[in-house]
Amino acid sequence: MAYAQAKTIDADAIPVIDITPLRDGTDPSGVAEALHAASQGLGFIYVSGHGIPDEAIEAARTSAYDFFRSPEAEKRKVAVSTKHRGYLARGGAKMQDDAKVDLKESFIWGYEDEKGKTPEDHDLRGANKWPEFLPDMQAHAMDYFQHAHRVAHHLMRGFALGLGLDDGFFLQTCATPLSRASLVYYPAQPEDMGEQQFGVGPHTDFGVLTVLCQDDVGGLQVEDANGEWIHAPPIEGTLIVNVADLLSRWTDGAYKSTPHRVVNSSGRERLSLVLAFDPDPDTLIDARQVHGADYSPGEAPITCGDYLIWRFGKAFSYRTSETDA
């Protein structure tokens, strides 16, 4: 048996966009042009100059490994809630109906105020569940969340400019965003599991934008325009940003949401820090807002909140289990 195969490309051939001029205002238009071009192609973008301190990344990673290496009984004390917060054990996610369950484990959290409170106004937003046996994890995770969320805001300004819109277009309804973050752990994957087993199976991301901080292990694979899988290798100092389904829908396919998967053939543990950016739940995703009132989009308008509820219900087994109904 073997691992699912993908082509290897030279890391030097991968374009990396420095978003510093977007963040500091020295050349937002230049960065926007680069983001616009990349989003119409593969839809996966390496960015440098993101501004997240190394210490924040390392603190989040340390807490993540401390959590995932803990006994299963301890982790299950913060088992995922019906609000999609907490620990999602191996087997809790499946990206396609006919696929094997993913090997990954995840810990999911989202926005909370300075008192640790979160609005309970939507099916995918509620109280975070922090493990009592790791008292530093909350501070480290929330610090990373805030940094990554600022990166997402900068990028959404860049995408808006690239589309010829006001730079605040995609941020008009972000007072109480549905954004969430995940620590995602991939155990070493034995080769004898075969080519149809994945750390996470082929999928596109559900929401508006994903900001991914991967480690140096590798294993992320992306499907190109020809339907071939290629490795997306780690590049030190960068984040990977990918257009997700709602941004593709918002732009009526002008920006591409690209299928991707993880095959951890390294023999080592792999860890990703993931920020999924989404606006307020009642935000209307309507391509006519981008292309003009007379435009005829391929898909009907839908709110961000309704779309995510539908997609989560298909992907996560706990959302249809009797215990969590």
Image (tube, grey):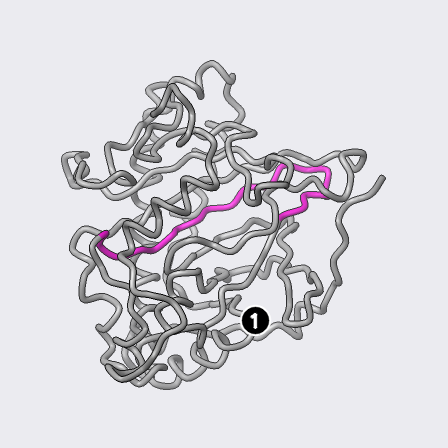
Residue 12 higher or lower than 214, as above or below: below
171 or 98: nearer the viewer? 98
In this view, the residue in front, 283 or 19, is 283
User: x%, y% of residue 217?
Assistant: 64, 47
Asked if the stretch drawn in magenta spans residue 274, the answer is yes
Which residue matches tag 1?
Answer: 42
Whole-percent x, y for residue 324 in the image: 36, 24
- Residue 190, image x and y in percent? 75, 34
In magenta stretch: residue 267: yes
Residue 105: x percent and y percent?
Answer: 52, 33
Left or right, 286 with respect to 115, comes to right
Extreme top residue here? 73
Q: Secondary structure at mark 1?
A: loop
- Quadrant in the rendering for residue 151: bottom left
**Type of the residue with mark 1:** Leu
Image-based side of 119 in relation to 19, left or right: left
The boundaries of the magenta stretch are: 262-281
